[in-house]
Image (spheres, rainbow, N blue to C red):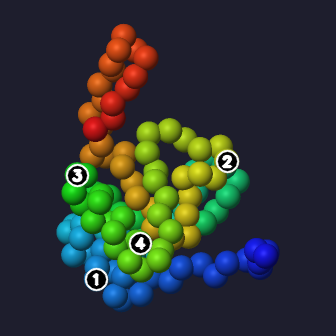
């Protein structure tokens, strides 16, 4: 039977922050101002992430996901679109791919798209 009790938000521990900083050097934002700036999208939801991760490449992205998995922290992606339903907010890790993941190729006469 599944519990309907609200889940406890993830806490950014010193170990988690150290592991993220090692995995994505220069790409981890944990200051309150950075986290609050990413705490909303076009929806009415307001969830403050424990940290915002801005990976410069797929290797750093993979490392950040491995850290999140190891620490059992949820990860939410924020990318090109706006969300009207709260999909781009999180109280875990917010992984922002808007800046560094912009390589888009249209394939098969527009029937497929490859995004970096």
Badge 4: how crowded within 10 Å, few (<14), some, or many (20+)? Answer: few
Mark 2 and mark 4: span between their CA atoms? 25 Å
Mark 1 and mark 3: span between their CA atoms? 19 Å
Q: Secondary structure at mark 4?
A: helix
Give the residue drawn at x 25%, y 52%: 58
Q: Mark on residue 18?
A: 1
CB of mark 4 within 8 Å of CB of mark 3? no
Badge 1: how crowded within 10 Å, few (<14), some, or many (20+)? Answer: few
Q: Earlier in the sequence, mark 4 or mark 1?
A: 1
Give the residue drawn at x 33%, y 35%: 115
- Which image quadrant: the N terminus? bottom right
Mark 4 and mark 3: span between their CA atoms? 19 Å
Residue under label 4, please give it: 69
Give the residue drawn at x 54%, y 79%: 10
Residue 48, position as x, y percentages in the image: 55, 69
Badge 2: how crowded within 10 Å, few (<14), some, or many (20+)? Answer: few
Q: Is residue 49 visible?
A: no
Please state which of the two labelled residues, at mark 4 or mark 1, is closer to the viewer.
4
Q: Earlier in the sequence, mark 1 or mark 3?
A: 1
Mark 1 and mark 2: span between their CA atoms? 32 Å
Q: Is residue 25 visible?
A: yes
Residue under label 3, please give it: 57
Residue 85, position as x, y percentages in the image: 67, 47
Residue under label 2, please give it: 85
């Amino acid at each position: 039977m599944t519990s309907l009790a609200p889940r406890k938000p993830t806490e950014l521990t010193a170990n988690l922050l150290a592991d993220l900083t090692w995995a994505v050097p220069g790409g981890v934002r944990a200051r309150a101002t950075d986290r609050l700036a990413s705490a909303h999208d076009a929806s009415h939801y307001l969830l403050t992430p424990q940290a915002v991760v801005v990976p410069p490449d797929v290797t750093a992205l993979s490392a950040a996901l491995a850290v999140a998995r190891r620490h059992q922290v949820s990860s939410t992606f924020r990318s090109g679109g706006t969300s009207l339903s709260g999909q781009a907010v999180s109280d875990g890790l917010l992984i922002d791919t808007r800046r560094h993941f912009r390589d888009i190729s249209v394939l098969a006469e527009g029937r497929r798209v490859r995004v970096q």
